Image (cartoon, helix red, strand yellow):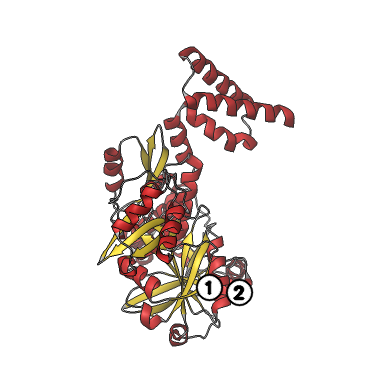
Amino acid sequence: MNTLEKSLLIKELHDLTSALSLKKLSLYETAKAKTRIKEIFMRCDEPIFQKQLLAFKTQLDPIQTAQEFAQQSLYAQSFRGFFTQVEELETALYQQPESGWAMLYHARTGWQIWLIPAENRSALLSEFQDLEQTYRWLLEQQQQYNCLKTDAELNQVTQLAQLQAAEQQIPQVLPTVAVAEADTNSTTENMISFDLITEPTLVSKADSLQIERTEASQPEMALEPIENQVIATPIVSEANDNTDTTSALLSTAQATTIVKPGSNKVKSLQLNQYDCPISALNLVQNESAELYRVFVPEVPELTQYADVVVHLSTPEEDQQQVLARAVYVAEQTDLHGKFVKYVVLLGALDQMQAIRLMRSFCDQFEHELAAVREISWEKLQSHLFDFDRLFECYSHTAQVVWQQENYFPFIPVQHVHATKFIQFEESEAQSQTPLILLKERQKIRLIHGQKRLQLSRTEQAVPHILLDRQHGISWQMIQKIISQLQQPIDALQLCQAIQMHQEN
């Protein structure tokens, strides 16, 4: 099949899928379209088509396609199932305390992934999108939380458990050694058994040389430093048929173990009362080789609203030097401008280096910086471990270093009273559309932004413009301005009208 033929088939698939999604075909035409799609599948069963075919297969059989997709993923053994009802999904997902993931499907909105980020924690929810987009979200969360084990890692754990079980059987075999050693009148067959049991404990010079070569050839680990790497070298014993089982058991249990230090020793920071291990990040830029991710095991919810990283300019640098420098906090967004979480950087030498390091960190997740602010650790430390307090500290105490053009700061959704006092028709919203809010006393009320809030129910924070009653803005004034504007009313249009009214 040449390139032109492939292009024509792909175009035909797009046309057929569009017709099916509009649901305007008759029953006969629908059946005919699905049959034609299946025929194209048979002709295009090549790797180059797999990505394109996924979207079309979901039109024909979404449940089967999603299940096959999950089983072919890196985390198939952690998959809890595919569901169309939330209640059934929650039951299956929370039955097992360890991390796992599941899929929810709605015919109109698509797929949603539920992910348990840590043992006995509430699930994180993706937006409803297509299969590929939701799986990309899962991979992003996995990079953030490192909560799922791949199938290969789980298989290694199983193999290790089997090895430990074999080791526990050794005491049952060793008495045979004592008996054989004490019995000077044992038969030749018993002497052979004795030799087979004791011989594996000896390592010849040739074996030692092979071990050294094995250790020297191990590649250095660039990601997630490992303190110890266990390499088992099986010992081969000559045995007759009736002693194979015992020999194999002992050879596995008494295998030579080599302990190899990781390329980066695990260090830690003491942040308040928490002892926080750090792990080296392997990013493209040379400077970022000195960038480490900071973990706070006692506060697992921190990873849901902030990534904490530290820059060490020299290996000998101590904690006091790091925390004496300015701390940089940034708002991190996805490519659509939606808030992801904060980035908190410790140890940067200056503002320019801080921006470079934070951008390098965000690039690995295809995220962007919306704004960067600076604050001292002394002022930040009591606010870092609570989302609301971190937002208040970032908004009111930290000093602006840099921000995007046409930037609007983000506010946690739970801070907003989402019921509008003044009812009017709003223009359609996008991710970058800010809420227009009015602060009165200790409450923040919505003026404009119901459609913006409806874009996603999983967002933690949204862009906003905050007006204040103390600056002479009243509900009566806002009502008068709205009555003079043509509906539907755009958020920025309303904000500009309010500002012009204040200036006049």
Q: Residue at x 47, y 35 (%)?
A: 68
Q: Residue at x 71, y 27 (%)?
A: 5
Q: Nearer the viewer, residue 36 or 102?
A: 36
| Residue 238 % position (x, y) | 53, 55
Q: Could you tell whether 450 is left or right of 329 in the image? A: left
Residue type, mark 1 in image: Leu
| Residue 106 % position (x, y) | 38, 35
Q: In the rendered image of this protein, does residue 451 appear above or below residue 280? A: above
Q: Nearer the viewer, residue 282 or 84?
A: 84
Label disc, if present, on residue 212 of the rendered structure:
none
Q: Could you tell whether 395 is left or right of 315 in the image? A: left
Residue 183 appears in which quarter of the rendering?
A: bottom left
Q: Secondary structure at mark 1?
A: strand
| Residue 236 % position (x, y) | 53, 57
Crowding at mark 2 (Cα within 10 Å: few <14, some 14-19, many 20+): some
Crowding at mark 1 (Cα within 10 Å: few <14, some 14-19, many 20+): many
Query: Is any atom of residue 132 visible in this view?
Result: yes
Q: In the rendered image of this protein, does residue 146 appear above or below residue 51? A: below
Q: Which residue is under mark 2?
A: 287
Q: Which residue is under mark 1?
A: 291
Q: Could you tell whether 105 is left or right of 421 in the image? A: right
Residue type, mark 2 in image: Glu
Q: Are marks 2 and 1 in contact (CB under 8 Å)?
A: yes
Q: Residue at x 50, y 72 (%)?
A: 292
| Residue 37 % position (x, y) | 56, 23
